Amino acid sequence: MEPLPSLKPLLAVLVSLGVVPILMSSRSANVREAWTFGAAGLKFLLVLAMLPTVLEGRELVCTLAEVLPGVAFRLRVDALGMLFALVASSLWIITSAYSIGYMRGLQEHGQTRYFCFFALALSATIGAAFSANLFTLYLFYEMLSFATYPLVTHHQDAEARRSGRKYLLYIVGSSIGLVLPAMIFSYHLSGTLEFTSQGFLPRAGSPVLLGVLLFMFLFGFAKAAVMPLHAWLPAAMVAPTPVSALLHAVAVVKVGVFCILRVLTGVFGLDLLASFHLGAAVACVAAFTIIVASLIALTQNELKRLLAFSTIGQLSYIVLGAALLSPKALVGGMVHIAMHAFGKITLFFCAGAIYVATRKKYLSDLVGIGKRMPVTMAAFFVGALSVIGLPPTGGFLSKWYLVLGTLQAHQWPMLLVILSSSLLNAAYFFPIVYRAFFFQGDQSLSDNTTQEAPLWCLVPLIITAVCTILFFFYPFPFLRLAELAGL
Amino acid sequence: MNVHYPALLVIIPLLASFFISAAGWLRPVWCFPLAVAAMAGSLLVSLGLLVDVLLGIPGLYWFGGWPPPWGIYYRVDHLNTLVLVIIAAVGFVNLMAARPTVERDFPEKAGPFYTLYVLFVTGLLGMVVTGDAFNLYVLLEIAAITGYALIALGKGRAALSSLHYIFMGTIGACFYLLGVGYLYIVTGSLNMEDISRLLQPLHGSNVVIVAFVIMMVGIWLKMGFFPLHAWLPNAYTYAPSPVSSLVAPLMTKVMVYVMIRMILTVFTLDYAFLVLKLNDAVVWLAVIAIVAGSLLALAEKDVKRMLTYIVVAEVGYMVGGFWLGNRAGFTGAVLHIVNDALMTFCLFLAVGNIIHVKGNSRLESLSGLFRTMPWTMGALVVGALSIIGVPPTCGFFSKWYLLLGAIQSGHYGFLAALLGSSLVGVVLFFRIFEIGYFEPLGASHGPAHGEGGAAVREAPLGMLVPLWITALSLILVGLYTGEIVGRVIRHAIPEMML
C-alpha cells in the first residue's frame, strides 16, 4: 500500500525538542516538570494516534528535505519503528515521574539541564525509531550520543569525567570510524540508503565486502553493546539512576539494537544474509556476548553494574533474534525490545529507589532489605522473572518466540545458548531476592519497620512491574507489530 | 537583473573605503555606518548575482566596454557565485560582531581598521569574480597587504607574525605572478579563457609545466597548505579577534577557489589530471596536511591557536577533494569552501567572544564557561559538531562528498585521513567542553552543590547575535545541501569528470 503523507511523525519527534526552551527558561521547578509531563504525554498521544494506521498495515511518511541525491531527510513510521516508539514514549512519562522523585529525593544539582537533555534524548530516540533511511537514522543516532553525554556526566566529578570519556570514545569513535564509512560505502554500491523490506544492497556484491560492511555496522552501532564494544555501558552507570533506567536500559541501548535490526532487515535483507551465510557469523558474536555478559554479571557486587551486564546480554538476544534468519526468531527479537524494556526499567527503578531510601548500592549491603522495602523488592522480583524469561511475565513470550525460532532455523547450539543464559540469569537474580527476604543482614536494615522510597519513586516502579505482568496476558500491540514487521 | 552587478560588487566597497578613510579623519563616528553600508551593498549585490545564476543569466562584465581578451572582464558562474555570497556574508556579519571589540580595544584606530577591513573584503571579492589572471594578482595583493596591516593591529607578537606573513605571503604572490608571466610569454594573453584556448597546442611545453608548478606552489603558500603553512598559526593567533574571524575563514578558502579556477579555466582538467598525472601525489600531500594539521592542533593549549591548525587540516580536505578528480570529490571541495568558511567563522567568533570576556583563550581559562557564558559555548558546540561532521550541520555533508569521492576513486589513504581527523576533532573539542563543563570539579555527589553558582558573564548582545546567526546558518546550510549542490555546484562540474 502507498505510504500516507503525514506530519504526525515529525510532530512526535519535535514535541520534546520544542519544550527545551521552555524548560530552560522556567524559573520554578514545578512549572518545569509540568511542561515535561505535558511534552511526554503529548508525545505518547501522538505516537498512539499513529498506531491504528500502522496496525492496518499502512505506513506514514514525512519528507523534510532531499539532502543528497537519492537520500532524503525523511521520517517513516512502520511496524518496527512504531513498536520501539511506543515503548520509548510510554516509558518516558513514567520515567519523568520517577526522575522527580529521584532528583528531588537526592537534592541533585543542575536539574534544569537534566530535564532539558532528557527531552532532547527522547526526541532523538523517537527520530531514530521513525527514520526512513540510514542517513536519517545516523543523524538521530549521533544526536542521541551527544545529548546523553551531559546526562552520563551529570555529577561533574572526576569519575563522571572518566566515564564520559569512555562513553564518547566507544560510541562516537565507533559511529564515525565504522558506521560512517560503511554507510557511504553502501551508498556507493547501491546509490540509495532507503530501507526496503528486502534490503537495498546489490545481490551481486562480493561476499567479503558485504561481510566487512556487516561487521562495520554491527560493531559501529556500539550502543548495542555487542562485545567487545560493551565497556561503555557499565561505565555509564555513574549517571543518575533514571538516566540508567530509561537511557541505558531502553532508549540508548535499544536504539543501538534497533539500528542493527534495521541494518540486518532493511539494508542487507534476510535473504541476502542467508545466501552468504552471514547470519550465522552475527549469531555467533551475539551468542558469545550473551554468555560472557551473563558470566560477568555473576561476579558483580554493585547492583547497577550487575544490571548493566545483564542488559548487555539481553541486548544480544535481540541481535540473535534477527541473526537466526527465521521469522519466529525475528518476532521474538522485536518483541524483546518491548519486554526487556519494561522488565529492566523496573529493575533499575528498584535500584534507584533503594539508593534514595537507604543510600546503598552494593549487593552485600542489601541482605535483608526485603523487610524494609517489601513493595520495591516484590517489583524487583517481577522484573527479574521477566528478564530471566519466566511466566507470568512478558519476558517469557519473547524468549518463547526466540526458542521457537532456533528450532525453526535448526540452530541447536543457539537453543542451548538461550537456555543456559536463562539459567545464568536466574543464578544472578534469585540470590538477590532470596537474601533480601529470607536473610538477616545489616543492623540498620533489620529494625522491622517498612520504609519505602518516596511515592514519586515507588509508583512508577509499581506501574512498570504491573505492565510486565500484564504483557504476559495481553501482548497484543507489541506482538502484532512485531509480526507485521517480520512479514 | 542589473548588468553592472559584477562590477558593483567590487566598486561599492572600493569607493566606500575612501570615504571611510576620510571619515576617519573628519568624523570617526561615521566610519562604522559607512562600512556597514558598504558590506550590506556587497552582500545584496552578491545575492542578486546568485539569483541571476540560478535563473541562468550569465553575469559577464567588460570593464570600459573592452571585449575580452583586450579588457579586464568579470565573470560570475556556478563555481564562484556561492563563494562570493559567503565572502560578502561573512564580511557583513563579522563587521557587526567586530564593533564592541574595536570600540574597547583600539578605538583610536577605528578609522584605519574599517578602511582596511572593507578593502580586504574588496580584494577577496575581486579575486573571486575576475576573469583576468593579472587582475587577480592585483586584487590578491590588495587583500594581502590590507590583511598584513589588519593582523598587525593586534597586541604582543602580532607585528612580528605579520612580518613573517608578509615575507611568506609576498613569496607566494610573486610565485603566482611569475606563473602568470610565464603564461604571458607563451600565449601573450592575460584573459583566463583566452590563455586556456591558446594553451591547447602547448600542453607539452616545459614552460607551461613550470608555470603550472610555480603557480600552484604560490597558491598553496597563500592558502597555508602543509608544509607551506608556517606563517598561518601565528598570524591568525595574534591578530585581534575581529580580524582573525574575518581573515582565517576567508583567505584560505579564496585561495582554494583560485586553485580550482586556475586549473579548471586556465590549464584545464585534461592538462592537470591527464597530462601531468599529479593527482595521486597531491592527494597524498593533502593526506599529510590533514594528519599534520590535526596532530599539531592536538598539541596546542590555546583554543585560538588550535583553531588555526584546524584550518590547516581543513585546507587539506579541499585540496585533496579537488585532486581526487571525480565528481563527488569536486562537489565536496567546492561545498567545503562554503561550509568550512562558515564553520571556522562560527568558531573564531565564539573564541572572539571568549577573548572579549576572559582576555585570552587558553585552555585553563575556560573552566566553568558553560555556566558563565552559556550562549557563546552553545554556539561553539554547534560549530564543533560541524567540524566533527555531525549531521544535520553542514560539515557533515561536505565530508560526505569528500568521503564518497575517496571511495569512488579508491583512495583509502584520504578516506582514513578524513575519518581520523574527524575523530581528532572529537578529542579536540570535547577537551574544551570537559574543561568548560567539569571544572572546577564538583566536590562530591550530594546537596553540597546546589543550583546557581558563578553568575552569567556573557559577551555583549552585539557579539552574541552575529554568533548565533552563524551557528544557525550551519544547520540551515546543512539542510539545504541538496538545493545548493543540485542547483549550483552540480552545474560547475566539468562534463569530462567521471
Image: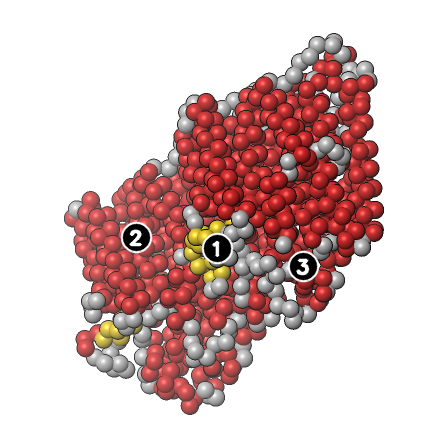
User: With respect to residue A348, does B404 lie above or below?
Assistant: below
Cα distance in 3D space between marks 3 and 1:
23 Å
Q: Chain of mark 1?
A: A
Q: Which residue is mark 1?
A: A3
Hey, what amino acid is under mark 2? Phe
Cα distance in 3D space between marks 3 and 2:
55 Å
Badge 3 density bin: few <14, some 14–19, many ≥20, Cα 10 Å: many
**Rendered location of residue A167, percent (x, y):** 63, 42
**Rendered location of residue B282, percent (x, y):** 54, 71
Q: Residue at x 54, y 66 (%)?
A: A191
Cα distance in 3D space between marks 2 and 1:
45 Å
Hey, what amino acid is under mark 3? Leu
- Marks 2 and 1 close (CB-CB < 8 Å): no
State which mark lies toward you, 3 or 2.
Answer: 3
Q: Which residue is mark 2?
A: B92
Q: Which residue is mark 3?
A: A270
**Which image quadrant for residue B353?**
top left
The figure's colour scheme reads secondary structure
Say whether residue A16 is left or right of residue B428. left
State which mark lies toward you, 2 or 1.
Answer: 1
Tell me which label, 3 or 1, sits earlier in the chain.
Answer: 1
- Is residue A50 among what the camera can see? yes
